[in-house]
């Protein structure tokens, strides 16, 4: 199990550029949180990278992420990763008990929302994105309407971090990888 294999798995199941970039964005945020919490950056990064790898092929509930978890198990990925991935979808009823699971839940929707906030800016550059802009867009229910704002707020709460601090942390993580993410 290494990042090269995880990226190949993502690309095997996910052809959409935007969904691949979402996996990469969540990976960036997860690696940053792993560093903050002195955790295994490879495990955390690959968990972020692969959390939605099955979504394009199995988009209906409960297939995603259950089918993906089965594939990861067959390929020998660790149980801790699979449990975190299952827990990022609240409808699976898999509790988010580990710090890894809480971080994945906290980073998933927010990474997608920050990407959307960046792409509507005239410059399309994350370097110019501020927390206040993200908070303002969160109030606009018509903007990125598929993003679960409740999950964004709950994710920060589960990590025990103020929402603005969490938003800034994820913005900073994505800024460090802006070229790869097209931001």
Image: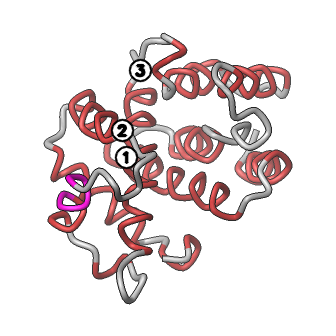
Image quarter of the N terminus? top right
Secondary structure type for disc 2? helix
Would you say the magenta stretch is mainly helix, strand or loop?
Answer: helix
> Disc 2 marks which residue?
106
Q: Is residue 179 magenta?
A: no
Q: Which residue is mark 1?
A: 33
Give the Cα separation between the discs numbered 2 and 3. Answer: 12 Å
Residue with the most extreme front position = 142
Mark 3 burial class by Cα count in 10 Å: few <14, some 14-19, many 20+: few
- Residue 27, given in percent of the width and then of the height, sits at 54, 51
Location of mark 3 (residue): 98
Residue 150 in the image, given as x and y percentages of width and height: 29, 34
Q: Earlier in the sequence, mark 1 or mark 3?
A: 1
Q: Which of the 4 image quarters holds residue 140? A: bottom left
Front in this rendered view, residue 102 or 135: 135
Using the numbered discs, state the Cα–Cα distance from disc 1 to disc 3 in whole angstroms.
13 Å
Look at the picture and state if 176 lies above or below 11. Answer: below
- State the CA–CA distance, disc 1 to disc 2: 10 Å
The residues colored magenta run 135-139
Estimate the x, y position of residue 28 in percent, counting from the top left. 49, 57
């Amino acid at each position: 199990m290494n990042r090269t294999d995880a990226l190949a798995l993502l690309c095997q199941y996910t052809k959409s550029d935007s969904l691949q970039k979402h996996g990469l964005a969540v990976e960036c945020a997860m690696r940053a949180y792993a560093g903050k919490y002195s955790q295994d950056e490879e495990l955390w990064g690959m968990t972020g990278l692969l959390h939605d790898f099955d979504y394009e092929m199995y988009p209906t509930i409960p297939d995603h992420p259950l089918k993906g978890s089965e594939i990861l198990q067959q390929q020998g990925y660790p149980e801790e990763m699979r449990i975190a991935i299952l827990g990022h979808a609240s409808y699976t009823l898999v509790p988010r008990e580990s710090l890894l699971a809480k971080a994945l839940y906290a980073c998933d929707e927010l990474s997608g929302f920050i990407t959307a906030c960046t792409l509507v800016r005239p410059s399309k550059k994350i370097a110019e994105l501020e927390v206040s802009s993200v908070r303002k867009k969160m109030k606009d229910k018509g903007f990125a309407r598929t993003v679960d704002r409740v999950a964004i707020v709950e994710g920060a709460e589960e990590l025990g971090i103020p929402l603005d601090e969490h938003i800034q942390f994820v913005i900073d993580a994505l800024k460090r990888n802006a070229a790869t993410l097209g931001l």
